[in-house]
Image (spheres, grey):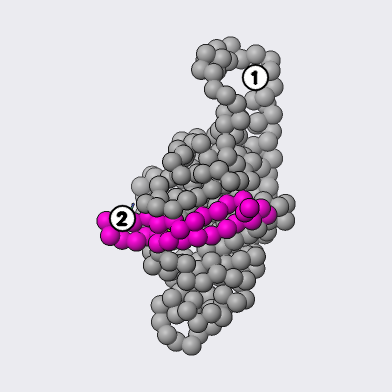
Amino acid sequence: MALLEIRNVARHFDGVRAVDNISLDVASGAFVSIIGPNGAGKTTLFNLITGTDQPTSGSITFEGQSLVGLQPDQFAGRGIARTFQHGRVFGNLSVLDNVLVGAHTRRKASRPRNMVVEFFGALFPTAAVKQEEQQLRQEAEAIIARFGERLTPRINNPASSLSYANRRRVEIARALALQPRLLLLDEPTAGMNLTETAEMLEFIRELKQQGLTIVLIEHKLSLVMELSDRVVVMDNGLKIAEGAPEAVRNDPRVIEAYLGNKQNTRFNRRDAENTERFNHRDTEDTERRQRIDD
Ligand SMILES: Nc1ncnc2c1ncn2[C@@H]1O[C@H](COP(=O)(O)OP(=O)(O)O)[C@@H](O)[C@H]1O
Ligand SMILES: [Mg+2]
């Protein structure tokens, strides 16, 4: 039994088949990437796996238990964490508090809820509560320190004051604070420059080496090719190819769908160009979002 099993999953929006009959297995410890043109249905598939959205049909199981119908806040308890394509952090909370949200969510998920105990615990924290708080804080600081000097010097700054790249790091740190067994990353390097992307590649590689099961949506194909055990290609809601990175890279259907033309061009030659295009889009997004945040 695979850790994550997706069977004939579809999500239709008023006639748009955003996800159309997708089946996919992710074994424990595997690194699977999902690629495909914009609008292929990649993010929608993540939304279905993590309860942000519900499938029109099909089944999704994690460790043999169905995920369909669960609320997003129940996923931490199952050991599933995700990040969002455009990054989601609590702008008014500090870097540390953002990550502590992840740690607290895990702690709550691992315990039966008792509102009375929680209420009095918050009013009159006992030594045990204080000690636990201290422990969660240390855990959060350790996760933040994994990003080197990127976040630690800003640990008490509000997330809204951070660069886009740093906000994305905070979001990943918060996901890791859930201590997930499955991590879903939606375009973690979007909006990042070459140095930042290389750094993120190393970071994700470490997570993989530690045995974390990862599903990655990513446009930067060099990164996908380097990290993945298996690559799944989506187009128009369908899975059009699946296999080892090299096999997928040279699959003519993939080249045609992904590049949107019939030129006889290899992925790697167009990779830089694609990255550039997507980065451009992301930069515009970033600027727009920053204006909104400001
Ligand atoms: N909430 C929604 N309502 C209607 N259409 C949607 C919704 N979410 C996604 N879609 C559509 O589903 C398709 C797949 O989108 P998405 O999953 O975001 O693609 P990708 O992440 O591969 O770029 C697109 O055509 C998109 O417009
Ligand atoms: Mg997407």
In the rendered image, residue 203 lying in the magenta stretch gets the answer: no
The correct choice, above or below, for 38 with respect to 158 in the image is below
For the point 47% across and 67% down, which residue is it? Answer: 239
Q: Which residue is mark 1?
A: 129
Q: Is residue 221 left or right of residue 56?
A: right
Instruction: Give me the C-alpha separation between circle 2 and circle 1.
Output: 46 Å
Residue 159 in sight from this viewpoint = yes
Secondary structure of the magenta portion, mostly? strand
> Could you tell me residue 50's position as x and y percent?
49, 46
> Could you tell me residue 116's position as x and y percent?
52, 13
The yes-or-no answer for disc 2 within 8 Å of ligand 1 is yes
Which of the 4 image quarters holds residue 225?
Answer: bottom right
- Name the one closer to the observer, 226 or 33: 33
The local secondary structure at tag 1 comes to helix
Which of the 4 image quarters holds residue 245?
Answer: bottom right
For the point 57% across and 39% down, which residue is it? Answer: 78
Residue 154 in sight from this viewpoint = no
Q: Quadrant of the C terminus?
A: top left
* Sooner in the amino-acid sequence: mark 2 or mark 1: 2
For the point 57% across and 52% down, which residue is it? Answer: 4
Q: Is residue 66 left or right of residue 53?
A: right
Q: Which residue is mark 2?
A: 13
For the point 54% across and 22% down, which residue is it? Answer: 113
> Could you tell me residue 164's position as x and y percent?
49, 52
Q: Report the disc number at residue 161.
A: none
The local secondary structure at tag 2 comes to strand
Q: Inspect the image, locate mark 1, and give the three-letter code of the amino acid beneath it.
A: Val
Q: What stretch of residues is rendered in magenta?
A: 1-29
Q: Inspect the image, locate mark 2, and give the three-letter code of the amino acid beneath it.
A: Phe
| Furthest-left residue in this view | 14
